[in-house]
């Protein structure tokens, strides 16, 4: 099942990583105004890396204060998620080498600031969805999960509004970030399962 999901994600990325199709650039044009100077969307976009850094750091500090080993493990897993996400995003940017929409369509897309980096996938979106997915995995509370995903979706929208990415870049970023969180969680479970198998706890051990 996980292999099928991974293959589906890879196929999706390959499908939308080529030259922008009509729907892609048309949707970007409809969202990106001639003068994308909204302070709201600039602020939303700017929260990405600050929030992503604060989540594992805050969780780790809370674990130290409460002396909670499980919470500390969660902070490590969240941090590992961001490491995997950053690596995957960087690798994909180099592999697909997609030109940003404002560089390819200078008369149609108007970025809020000059930039000439690689477009696919959106790093801001990837990071925000990695954060949201990590929170949903570690804290299964709707009043945390729902706002987290709404924030992540807002970051993705802001990147299109600000003229920095195609919608397909944002979709791929969301897939990459979410996938990184679930892959990290799966690997973490496998790692601890292997440790338990190598160091079984028996009744004799418990009473020695």
Image: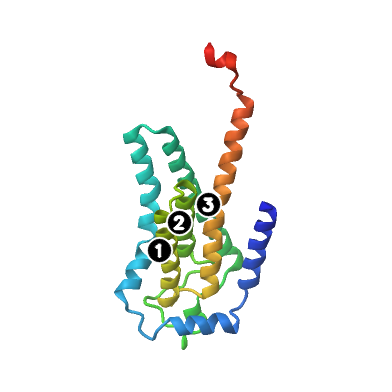
- Residue 166 in percent (x, y) is at 51, 75
Image quarter of residue 45? bottom left
- Residue 77 in percent (x, y) is at 49, 43
- Residue 17 in percent (x, y) is at 61, 71
**Residue 175 visible in the displayed image:** yes
Spatial separation of the CA atoms under disc 2 and disc 3: 9 Å
Residue underneath mark 2: 132
Q: Nearer the viewer, mark 3 or mark 1?
A: 1
- What element does badge 1 sit on? helix
Q: Is residue 75 left or right of residue 201?
A: left
Reply above or below: 184 against 197.
Answer: below
Give the residue at x 46% y 38%: 73
Reply above or below: 153 against 88.
Answer: below
First of labels 2, 3 by sequence position: 2
Q: Is residue 113 left or right of residue 106?
A: left
Dots 1 and 2: beta carbons under 8 Å? yes
Spatial separation of the CA atoms under disc 1 and disc 2: 8 Å
First of labels 3, 1 by sequence position: 1
- Residue 63 in percent (x, y) is at 37, 37
Residue underneath mark 1: 151
Give the colour scheme shown.
rainbow
User: How crowded is the residue under tag 2: few (<14 C-alpha within 10 Å), some, or many (20+)?
Assistant: many
Give the residue at x 44% y 47%: 139
- What element does badge 3 sit on? helix
How many numbered tags mark residues here?
A: 3
- What element does badge 2 sit on? helix
Spatial separation of the CA atoms under disc 3 and disc 1: 16 Å
Q: Residue furthest left?
A: 39
Residue underneath mark 3: 181
């Amino acid at each position: 099942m996980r292999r099928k999901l991974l293959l589906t994600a890879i196929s999706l990325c390959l499908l939308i990583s080529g030259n922008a199709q009509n729907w892609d650039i048309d949707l970007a044009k409809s969202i990106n105004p001639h003068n994308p100077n909204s302070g709201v969307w600039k602020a939303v976009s700017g929260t990405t890396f600050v929030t992503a850094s604060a989540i594992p750091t805050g969780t780790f500090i809370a674990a130290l204060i409460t002396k909670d080993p499980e919470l500390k493990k969660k902070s490590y897993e969240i941090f590992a998620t961001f490491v995997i996400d950053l690596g995957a995003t960087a690798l994909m940017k180099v592999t697909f080498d997609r030109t940003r929409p404002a560089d390819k369509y200078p008369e149609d897309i108007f970025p809020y600031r000059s930039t000439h980096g690689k477009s696919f996938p959106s790093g801001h979106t990837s990071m925000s969805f990695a954060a949201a997915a990590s929170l949903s995995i570690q804290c299964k509370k709707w009043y945390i999960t729902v706002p987290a995903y709404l924030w992540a979706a807002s970051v993705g929208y802001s990147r299109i509004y600000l003229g920095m990415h195609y919608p397909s870049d944002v979709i791929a970023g969301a897939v990459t970030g979410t996938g990184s969180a679930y892959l990290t969680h799966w690997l973490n479970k496998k790692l601890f399962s292997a440790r338990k198998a190598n160091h079984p706890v028996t009744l004799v051990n418990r009473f020695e």
